Image (tube, helix red, strand yellow):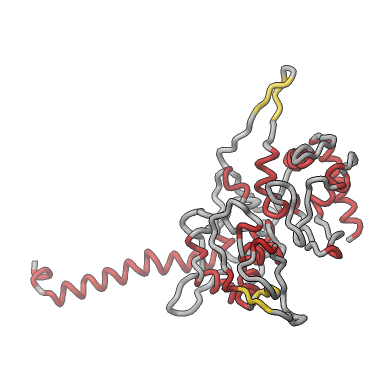
Amino acid sequence: MELFNNHKKLFRAAAVLFATLTVFVAVLPALHNQENNAPLPQSEPLSASAVRGKAVYIANGCVACHTQQVRNVDMDKVWGTRPGIAADYARNHRIDTWRNTATLMGTERTGPDLTNIGLRQPAIDWHLTHLYNPRIVVQQSIMPAYPWLFIIKENPAKEDVVVNVPAEARDEEGGKIVASAEALDLVAYLQSLKQVALPDGRATPEFLYKKQQAVTTGGSKTIELDGAALYTANCQGCHQQNGEGLKGAFPALKGSSVVLDNNPELMVDIIMNGYTGRMQEGFGPMPPVGTNNNLTPEEVAAIMNHEKTSWGNNAKKVTPDQVKLLVEKVQSLTKDKK
């Protein structure tokens, strides 16, 4: 054929074919997705600080170890309240004409998924401590520390954010550890990562391949949840594996009067609605973990029973039915206050 003997015609034909395929395979589908996957109504655009923090996230290689995608399999339920959909990423845009880092979905989970980290861990104190040295809050963590995001100051200014770091975890003696602007921007980006509710009438995708452990009791089968695993997924990051918390940052559950109280109402209220009652002691506000993580009464009961019977605690256990009634009560009281 003459086409294969004439390099100019061959090159032109290849260029036209490539351009045509680009339009139909890349450009038109992208435009279609852009038009049909608008941002969810409750989602918010990134603040200026969060936009800068996203650049810090990229620059420090966080995407190599953390994903931002909740798959529709049951094992991903700990990372979000529902599987991710295309609309979750509709607000992501290119950094500029030449760089496309709109979505940071990642490729592997050496570390936890961060899709919903802004709700799972909203406290700035936790994030800054974790960035300075992850082993302070997660003893088994293999994440590298980022001390260069912090500054040592003898006399911090009023506007400086001082990080409470235990003496044994510090690299240098003397002075106060202050978060740099980069650290604060990175935390702002992490706090912005939140799953939002789907619009009314839109079906919520289900988690597939659910696993439950059936336990036979008196001829009937009941579901026994692993309280230790639920505690690890939802509470251990702050209160620690040994239940002793972190001095100056997160209170201990070991020997806690709230945990040991035979009346579990306050404990349920704290789990579902959060708590600010110990801020005067230097502890940050506790987020409403149960509500943020969409925990069922059965899961809340399993966590409470683990805390009530671990680390030397010996308190009366609760039942899922008891917790369910208390959840309804504390949530209704919260609505009345609003």
Image point 46% across, 72% down: which residue? 100
**Residue 65 in the image: x percent, y percent?**
50, 58
Q: Where is residue 146 shown, x and y percent of the image?
A: 57, 68
The correct choice, above or below, for 274 with respect to 101 in the image is: above
Left or right? Give the position of 296 relative to 103. right
Instruction: Residue at 58%, 76% (x, y): give it.
Output: 52
Camera-side residue: 314 or 220?
Answer: 314
Q: Is residue 105 left or right of residue 228?
A: left
In the picture, which quadrant includes the C terminus? bottom right
**Residue 156 image-quadrant placement:** bottom right
Image side of residue 41 versus residue 36, left or right:
right
Residue 127 picture location, percent across and down: 66, 64
* The one of 190 and 170 positioned closer to us in this rendering: 170
Residue 68 visible from this viewpoint: yes
Q: Nearer the viewer, residue 28 or 260?
A: 260
**Where 47 sits versus 326, above or below?**
below
Say if residue 50 shows up in the picture.
no
Q: Determine which quarter of the picture holds residue 118.
A: bottom right
Identify the residue at the far front of this view. 173
Locate the N terminus by quadrant: bottom left
